[in-house]
Amino acid sequence: MEKLCYVLWKRPGASGDALRDALVRDAVPALRARGARSLVLLAADAHAEAVQTARRTRMDDPIAGMLTLWLDCVDAHGAVEALLAPHVARLAGYLVTESVVLPNTTHRAPPGTRTPGTTMLALLEKPERLAFDDWIALWHERHSPLALEIQCTYRYVRNVVARALTPNAPPWRGLVEEGFPTPAVTDPMQWYRAEGDPEKMRDHLGRMIASVRSFLDIEKVESHPLSEYVLG
């Protein structure tokens, strides 16, 4: 089994809700018929739009979401892209290795319905200053434990890109799915588990920024608040 991630852009004039609904109604059943399993859709729908002040992007046309799925063999990715293409303006596909650092055991919902909370999707580039192995060590061995310690995350999934599957895909090497209680997305006190203590928040924020800067060019980090739909 291999995991594929598709970052999606919506067509001009289309809403995030309309794209979500079209994918769930039309693309997902067709993908299942082609053997896709464990599908999860992250969507910039109306729920996510309510916390768009948390979005960090350099794109003039920000992403509309990401679809993840598992196939027996990545060689079938062309059929996946053919089924997604009619619904989007653009897509970028990646073959990844997945690490479920923190599974979601607290913010659950019936299959096909919206997960309570907000998923922050971080799209990461590896800085040229770091060798790949050093980058992975800093990210996995130092940054991930810190994030779990000082943030109120309920789900944390790392996807390390093995290779791009589509032409002209952005040079992202990491796609990170982090679930947060929605109020925390716009409230640093909650996000950083500061418990109303400004000094504690400054400490946690400073540690996080220092950690991020150790393995990323912070100005290139993309971070998008999205709704999660576990489709099975």
Image (cartoon, rainbow, N blue to C red):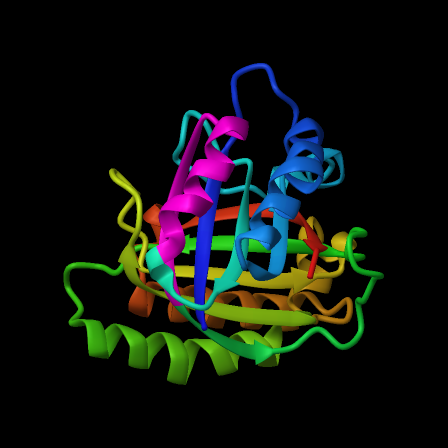
Left or right: where does residue 211 sit relative to residue 19?
A: left
| Residue furthest top in the image | 13
Give x and y (percent) for residue 158: 47, 69
| Residue furthest front in the image | 33
Q: Residue at x 42, y 45 (%)?
A: 79
Picture layout, residue 42 above or below residue 61? below
Give x and y (percent) for residue 12: 52, 16
Considering depth in this image, is 135 or 79 the residue closer to the camera? 79
Give x and y (percent) for residue 152: 68, 70
Picture layout, residue 131 above or below residue 74? below
Which quadrant of the rendered structure holds the N terminus?
A: bottom left
Q: Residue at x 55, y 36 (%)?
A: 64
Q: Residue at x 62, y 50 (%)?
A: 41
Q: How many discs mark residues in the rendered view? A: 0
Considering depth in this image, is 178 or 168 the residue closer to the camera? 168
Q: Residue at x 22, y 78 (%)?
A: 134
Left or right: where does residue 81 sit relative to residue 35?
A: left
Picture layout, residue 190 above or below residue 80? below
Left or right: where does residue 126 sit relative to residue 150?
A: left
Start and end of the magenta stretch? Answer: 76-96
